[in-house]
Image (tube, rainbow, N blue to C red):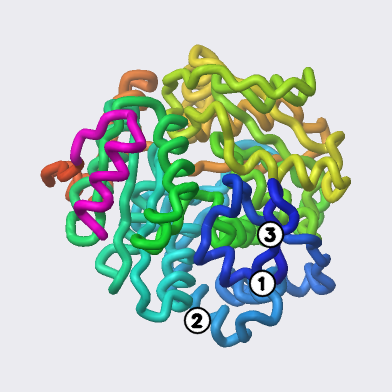
Amino acid sequence: MLLHNLKDSSEQVSFVQAVKTGLGRNQGVFFPDSLAPLTNVDELLEMDFVTRSSHILKHLIGDELTAEQVSGLVERAFNFDLELVEVEKNIYCLELFHGPTLAFKDFGGRFMAECLAEFSQGNKTTILTATSGDTGAAVAHAFYKKDNIDVVILYPKGKISLAQQKLFTTLGENIHCYAVDGSFDDCQAMVKAAFLDDEIKQRLGLNSANSINISRLLAQVCYYFEALARLPQAQRAKAHISVPSGNFGNVCAAMIGAVIGLPVAKLSATTNQNDTVPRFLASKDWSPTDTKESLSNAMDVSRPNNWPRVQHMLDNNWFSYENFYSNAVDEAKTEEVMLQLYNKGYLAEPHTAIAYEGLTRDLATDGVGVFLATAHPAKFKESVERILDVELAMPKPLADALAKTCLAEDLANDYHVLREALLVKLA
């Protein structure tokens, strides 16, 4: 699999190199030069999830890894379930929160961890990542106690839910967490600065586990095939998928699936009030604003790192702009839709409600909709209970994490402070 840096086309790498490097020169993301279509989609949709996912990832990765290697990575990573729930006629929810950290990022995080463990061959690796909520837990648990791999997680202090935070800040061992005095975008900027620092990159063996890493992105392609596999066959060609979008990795994965043959008619990348992409699509002016805090904090991103990949596919007509939608949903509407879904018998947290709202705004009258539930409602216990006037039972992983002590250290919003901390702790 040959990938090029979207900011510097002279930098071309293999899949293994891209996984080990994370981010390219000039903070560019890696992306394939082309995406070949699958020739056996109907057959794939009849397979079980793990078998199908192995075929899809082998197709995407190419000859760098054997079929046996890919199957082993997938079997070890995707060892939990997902569900497709019919919420109303012709509208389904793809529940991706049945993994160990109760969020969709378990799929990408665990596949990346298996890849890096296999590719690093015992060399020292430091995973440096920023999280707006769920990435931190997924990455921390995926890499927890893996030999020769340290994980450093930056998160915006006081701006993610307590349940999200406790899932990764209580582990210790090789998981190091910093509560940054700033926004997620500030955390992400510090991660990018580290990747421009040659000394840090070399001394620490730096890598990133954000969705900028191609292994995470490709892993996420697989569950869109599972969603359509669980639809009645007659409905598949009319599928409209709506993804709650912050850093735009998840909708990017859905678009990759469509490009290689997944029969998706339309895609919606629905944002909260951090609406850089919806405004860009309307005006063609890229003008990020300061990040606004919201109920859907995992989507509080104003400068989405994966947008260049999505735009690359759109601009090159791999996927049509006409079939791509991006709407913003404000706070009041988010609460209203959560209540609306609850009255239909479905309990949703804010991110899921935003995906549903984005779907219903643009779903054709004869269309079939799939919206994503990216996190368990209990991860947003306080807001869900307040808005819906219910009492949520805590799943055991959350209850256990909440009972533990937070081990995170406070950190100023200053790359030089982070740099010194990393050298002292890990070099």
Q: Is residue 94 magenta?
A: no
Q: Which residue is mark 3?
A: 11
User: Which label sits on residue 61?
Assistant: 1
Q: Is residue 90 above or below residue 361?
A: below
Q: Is residue 413 magenta?
A: yes
Residue 248 is left or right of residue 325, and the answer is left
Q: Do the numbered discs 2 and 3 sit on residues whose CB atoms are within 8 Å?
A: no
Residue 356 visible at all: yes
Q: Amino acid at mark 3?
A: Glu
Please tell me whether mark 3 or mark 1 is closer to you in this view: 3
Mark 1 closeness class: few <14, some 14–19, many ≥20 residues within 10 Å: some
Q: Do the numbered discs 1 and 2 sit on residues whose CB atoms are within 8 Å?
A: no
Q: Is residue 312 above or below residue 32?
A: above
For mark 2, give the secondary structure: helix
Please tell me whether mark 2 or mark 3 is closer to you in this view: 3
Front residue of 41 and 115: 115
Query: Which of the 4 image quarters holds residue 19?
Result: bottom right
The range drawn in magenta is: 409-427
- Residue at screen point 37% across, 75% down: 123
Please tell me whether mark 1 or mark 2 is closer to you in this view: 1
Residue 92 is left or right of residue 363, and the answer is left
User: Which label sits on residue 229?
Assistant: none
Residue 331 is left or right of residue 309, and the answer is left
Report the residue that reaches farthest toward the front: 199
Q: Which residue is mark 2?
A: 72
| Alpha carbon separation for disc pair 3 and 1 | 18 Å
Q: Which quadrant is home to the C terminus? A: bottom left
Q: Which quadrant is home to the N terminus? A: bottom right
Q: Amino acid at mark 1?
A: Ile
For mark 3, give the secondary structure: strand
| Alpha carbon separation for disc pair 2 and 3 | 30 Å
